[in-house]
Amino acid sequence: MSTTAGAGVDPRALEVLFTAARTPSRWTDDPVTDEQVAAVLELAKYPPTSMNTQPMRLLLVRSPAAREQLATMMSGGNGAKTRAAPLSVVVAADRRFDEEVPRLFPHLPDARGFFADDAFRERTALFNTALQLGYLILAVRAVGLSAGPMTGIDAPAIERAFFPDGEHEVVAVVNVGVAAEDAFRPRGPRLAFDEVVRTV
Amino acid sequence: MSTTAGAGVDPRALEVLFTAARTPSRWTDDPVTDEQVAAVLELAKYPPTSMNTQPMRLLLVRSPAAREQLATMMSGGNGAKTRAAPLSVVVAADRRFDEEVPRLFPHLPDARGFFADDAFRERTALFNTALQLGYLILAVRAVGLSAGPMTGIDAPAIERAFFPDGEHEVVAVVNVGVAAEDAFRPRGPRLAFDEVVRTV
């Protein structure tokens, strides 16, 4: 049987994930537990990646010292946002994701050899980590939390401090928590259909 | 009022978007209409991008001649998959997304100047297009269709044929339609929580 054909998704779910959800500027004091993070990952792990590579790695920054260190590595107002958030998650692309490929894509012999070229491997890591970040942001919303993703960061500094193996590319920091009242600024404009879509 | 705090999302929606959805290998003959594509975009346009840049562009490949041309530019079995799908959508990153930034991010004076460096601008286009592709795949599922994303493609050939301005980087082709019965192969393994997440 088809899994999704004709599926009617609850309109409230579409609001929570897509149309009414916003990036908050303020948070309540409610903590984000490891169990909530696990619930997010239990959703975000399933949508597809290229050859099932799954290169996204997450660092939960929980200790006060690490939180303060991270906050100094953010651009503009992002440091203050990071200090104020219940949880900050560093999102990184694992350039050595290929080590797991024989296990993750077992039906193709020598699937790992597909990623022998360094530039192609690193691009695959970046592209699929961004793809998985899209899934992650919507999964955070799906469990009743809000996500505040930021790419205005000093990625090389965060890599030196928290990923000393030199094999991870930091791509974003995502603050996670329960949005405070009045946490939302007016939403920016979105491109119109005809600005995004052509037909041939 | 907080938009998402405490939101309980219908469990069926989580199955349709995340946990039960799959990438189909076969499709029914049901067409995918422009109205359905518009409904997908009406969801996918809202989740966040860096500085609201929204660099993802879509080409709906509908004419038989264009479909056949595209199919010859796919790797391995992806050509046959593309010939068989109700609709194939080429996903491209617009390297000149910065032309729209003054309109899309109006509260930062000279926001466009932020993207003056070509390498940074092109990386921003790629990263945010992948992020938006994540939103797009889940939005396709949300309207009751299935998505078959493919990165095994001859991107330069597709760019030459369909994006002659030289300012678009093709990143994926996504087949879209209603999944046929028995369209699904066994799902590949997913990384465990402790393989993805560290805490500091």
Image (tube, coloured by chain):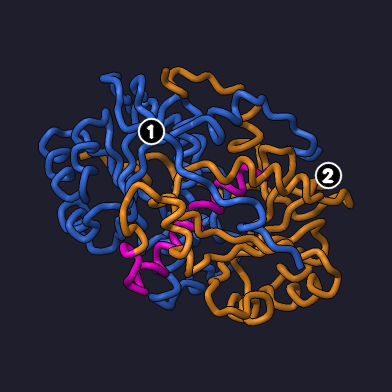
Chain colours: A orange, B blue
In the displayed structure, A160 sits above or below B86; it is below
Other-residue count near label 2 (Cα within 10 Å), few / some / many at <14 / 14–19 / ≥20: some
Q: Is residue B103 visible?
A: no
Q: Residue at x 55, y 59 (%)?
A: A56
Instruction: Give the residue pinned by disc 2.
Output: A181
Look at label 1 and name its amino acid.
Arg
Other-residue count near label 1 (Cα within 10 Å), few / some / many at <14 / 14–19 / ≥20: few
Magenta: main secondary structure equals: helix
Instruction: Find the magenta span and give its range.
Output: A113-140
Name the image quarter holding the N terminus of chain A. top left
Label 1: which secondary element = loop
* Parent chain of label 2: A
**Residue B6 placement: quadrant:** top right
Residue B169 lies left or right of residue A178; in this view the side is left
Magenta segment includes A94: no
Q: State yes or no: discs 1 and 2 in contact (Cβ < 8 Å).
A: no
Instruction: Give the residue pinned by disc 1.
Output: B185
Q: Residue at x 15, y 53 (%)?
A: B161
Looking at this view, name the residue that lies furthest to the left.
Answer: B65
Question: Closer to the camera: disc 1 or disc 2?
Answer: 1
